[in-house]
Amino acid sequence: MNKYLPLVAALVLSSSTVAAQSFEDVFNAQRALHGYGHAFTFEGEQYTTDHPEELEAAAPANATNAKALIASAKAMHAEVKAVGYDWTLTKGILKNASKALKAGDFQKAMNLAAQAKYHARMGVAQYHNSKQSWLNMVPE
Amino acid sequence: MKIITSWLAGAALALIAGMSSAASTGNTIATVDPEADRLALQAYFQKRFPEVELADYGNGIYALDAASRAQWEELEEFPPYEFDIEEGEELFNTPFANGKSYADCFENGGIGVRQNFPYWSEQQDQVVTLELAINQCRTANGEKKLGWKKGKIAQISAYMAFTSAGELIDIKVPNDKAKAAYLDGKAQFYSRRGQLNMSCANCHLQGVNIPIRADRTGPTLGHVTHFPVFRSKWGALGTLHRRYGGCQNNVRGTALKAQGEEYRNLEFFMSYMSNGLAVNGPGSRK
């Protein structure tokens, strides 16, 4: 059995650990492990596991900031729709953000707008990633 | 020494593994080869399900799962699409206000032609599906377009498929523009979409015959042969593009427009993959 261990190790290592981990890999691993608000170090620099949209939603909750975040979420949503990669929940979340703004619940509006913007940004990333990676799924 | 040999063998395998994950399939007009793609797809399924006859893939998941097949065969004793075929025939033969009919728009009077759709139209510079051709026929004769996903268009399509039963799918990719449309369809089939980050291939290639709660997903090989289908979930007949939209929603992606360029190109690719299989639509599915 032991003589096969190096073989197995080589196969496992070949696909992942040989290449240095990217910031994205490390961020995603830390986020999955710790959720938002966790500090970690990458190549000597300090970062947190927050998505940019979560940092935007952490700004003071007021009408101006809520309107701005909803507007930028809508812009990102338009961008993802243009490439045909929008997700089903995003539109509804944006609607709810606008409702919360009208109701004066600015923090809720900002949280929802941040969520919608994140969805849309991930959809755009998915579009670009698919352009590169679809080939790997084709049987040879 | 044995350990060194083992490491070397491991390294070689790792290298091969790396090479096979860097796919060399055609992804440009110059390199894409529809026939090579079709043979590779067939080989994939034949290797994975060696006991299944190629011709049986037109029956979808029922070619692979005996229990599902038994239920389906019972359902087919009184086919739920039977009345739709009859209504489709009546619609097909009802003249338009100008006295012409669908038969005037298609080769062979529209009988036994399903296997040639979709095709690349040089004149229109686009892929033309059967449903698109049906609506083009209507507008050319002064009639209103039908909805794309269900109802009358599905019934007419079902009748036309029924008259083509047993004919072998025969899709052609005649030139570079057609190749571009094929390539676009191919890229769409393998591209991940939606919040669940899944591609068509995740379910209908890698995920085939693997239980997802109470269901099993069918193979993409033979997918198009039995459309339109009467789905128990819909309680009605629906077109392939209706199903595309449903699939996309299932992975939490917003569905694209039925009969838009993306879905027509996807159908073009998928139909080419089923070249040589017999038309057996309309079908019934869960």
Image (cartoon, coloured by chain):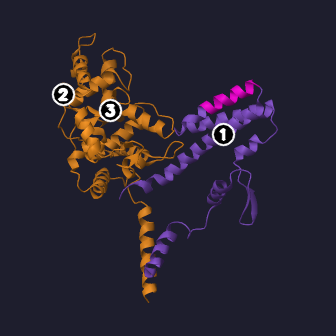
Q: Is residue B174 visible?
A: no
Residue A104 is marked as none
In magenta stretch: residue A94: yes
Percent position (x, y) of residue B218?
33, 44
Please give the chain letter of the residue carrying mark 2.
B
Residue A35 appears in view: yes
Give the magenta part as a residue range: A92-103
Q: With respect to residue B16, does A4 lie above or below?
A: below
Q: Residue furthest bottom?
A: B1
Identify the residue at image location x=32%, y=20%. Answer: B152
Q: Amino acid at mark 1?
A: Gln
Secondary structure beneath dot 2 equals loop
Does A85 lie within the magenta span? no
Viewer-nearest residue: B223 or B37 = B223
- Mark 2: amino acid: Ile
Q: CA distance from mark 3 to mark 2?
A: 16 Å
Q: Is residue A7 above or below residue A90?
A: below
Label 1 lies in what chain? A
Extreme-top residue of the structure: B97
Q: Helix or strand or loop: what does disc 1 sit on?
A: helix
Q: Could you tell me which quadrant the N terminus of chain A lies in? A: bottom left
Query: At x 75% / y 45%, what residue is drawn?
Result: A55
* Amino acid type of the residue that numbered disc 3 sits on in the rendered structure: Thr
Name the residue located 50 percent from the left edge and 66 percent from the top edge.
A15
Secondary structure state at the residue bearing disc 3: loop
Q: Which residue is mark 1?
A: A115
| Magenta part, dominant SS | helix
> Where does label 3 land, which residue?
B129
Q: Which chain is purple?
A: A
